[in-house]
Amino acid sequence: MSYPPKIYQDSKTSHLLEVIKQYPLATIISVENNTPIITHLPLIYKSKKLIGHIDKQNPHANLLREGKAVTVIFSGPDCYISPSLLGAKELPTWNYIKVHLQGTVSEIKNENAIKQSMVDMTAFLEAPENSYLLDFNNPKMEKFINYVMGFEIDILQWEGKFKLSQNNSEEVRELTKQQLILSQKTSIKPFLDHLY
């Protein structure tokens, strides 16, 4: 028996890429001396690779060099599904969308390539309004480039985990889909007010 059940697995590259594009903040996991090293960074997909940059002072930077194995997780929307939503006919559950990738990482050593990747990432993250465009020749970039390391990940394995109540009726799936949509619009102001 496979886990998660096949009904919750999605191997369609177009679906997985949509998650990566909509939710670009990745969890990057490397292992050193049997200890996981974890960093959260935005990554962009370009030319069949994931491209990013990291502060050179981050201890994880040393593991994002030539040929090292890496696991990357992109997290899409998720939410609790209450039985009250479904007329108390089902048990409580949690629906979610995740993309897990395995790959090998290599350092981008060319400073111009790192700067271009930062320009490209900014353009991607600013789309579609493009309220801000990062200038390749911005003087601050010249100072900043000394503190970052660029890297790219060759993707070797793709895995989509889409738990969306597929084991239920069409009516239940539609209700849980609406709950997932609603959960993403919930105001986070009280939460942020509490933190700040």
Image (spheres, rainbow, N blue to C red):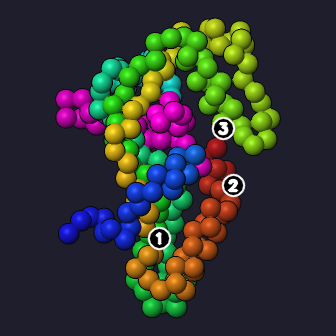
Give the residue number, with chain letter if any, for mark 2: 189
Quadrant where the image shows the C terminus:
top right
Tag 1 secondary structure: loop
Tag 2 secondary structure: helix
Q: Amino acid at mark 1?
A: Leu
Give the residue number, with chain letter if any, for mark 1: 164
Nearer to us in this view, 75 or 92: 75
The residue lying at 44 percent from left, 83 percent from top is: 168
* Residue 107 drawn at (x, y percent): 41, 19
Against 108, residue 182 (above or below) is: below
Q: Count the labels in the image.
A: 3
Nearer to us in this view, 30 or 124: 124
The residue lying at 41 percent from left, 61 percent from top is: 10
Give the residue number, with chain letter if any, for mark 3: 125
> Which residues are drawn in magenta?
22-51
Q: Nearer the viewer, mark 2 or mark 3?
A: 3
Q: Nearer the viewer, mark 2 or mark 1?
A: 1
